[in-house]
Amino acid sequence: MSKSPTEKYDTSDPGDEMQLRLRYQHGYGLILFCAAEVGQLDCKSLWFEQHEDILMEKNNGRFNFYQIKTREATLGKW
């Protein structure tokens, strides 16, 4: 029986490697989104890879710019 496509990465797809390098940015974006959703942040919208890693548009028309970096590759993907 063949495996489900969700059980194995397509290692021939260069997009998989790129997504592994951006996973921590997506995670931080999710943290920002959740904080905005419960009213802890003044956030109208979040933009990814728009001038910076994450661009947060505030309700007053101003913006916060985020550069998200890992500490060291040896400490894992995050």
Image (tube, helix red, strand yellow):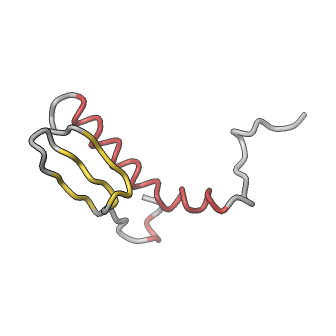
Q: Residue sitting at 41 percent across and 49 percent down? A: 26
Q: As drawn, is 44 to the left or to the right of 52?
A: left
Task: Report the residue that reaches farthest toward the top.
Answer: 38
Q: Residue sitting at 55 percent across and 62 percent down? A: 18
Q: Quadrant of the C terminus?
A: bottom left
Task: Report the residue that reaches farthest toward the left.
Answer: 60
Residue 37 drawn above or below residue 17 = above
Q: Give the total number of marks visible in the rendering.
A: 0
Task: Report the residue that reaches farthest toward the right.
Answer: 1
Residue 56 position in % (x across, y down) = 23, 48
Q: Please tell me which residue lies in front, 40 or 48.
A: 48
Q: Please tell me which residue lies in front, 66 or 45.
A: 45
Q: Quadrant of residue 54?
A: bottom left
Residue 66 position in % (x across, y down) = 25, 59
Q: Please tell me which residue lies in front, 21 or 71.
A: 21
Q: Residue sitting at 70 percent across and 50 percent down? A: 9
Q: Quadrant of residue 49?
A: bottom left
Q: Quadrant of the N terminus?
A: top right
Q: Residue sitting at 34 percent across and 59 percent down? A: 53
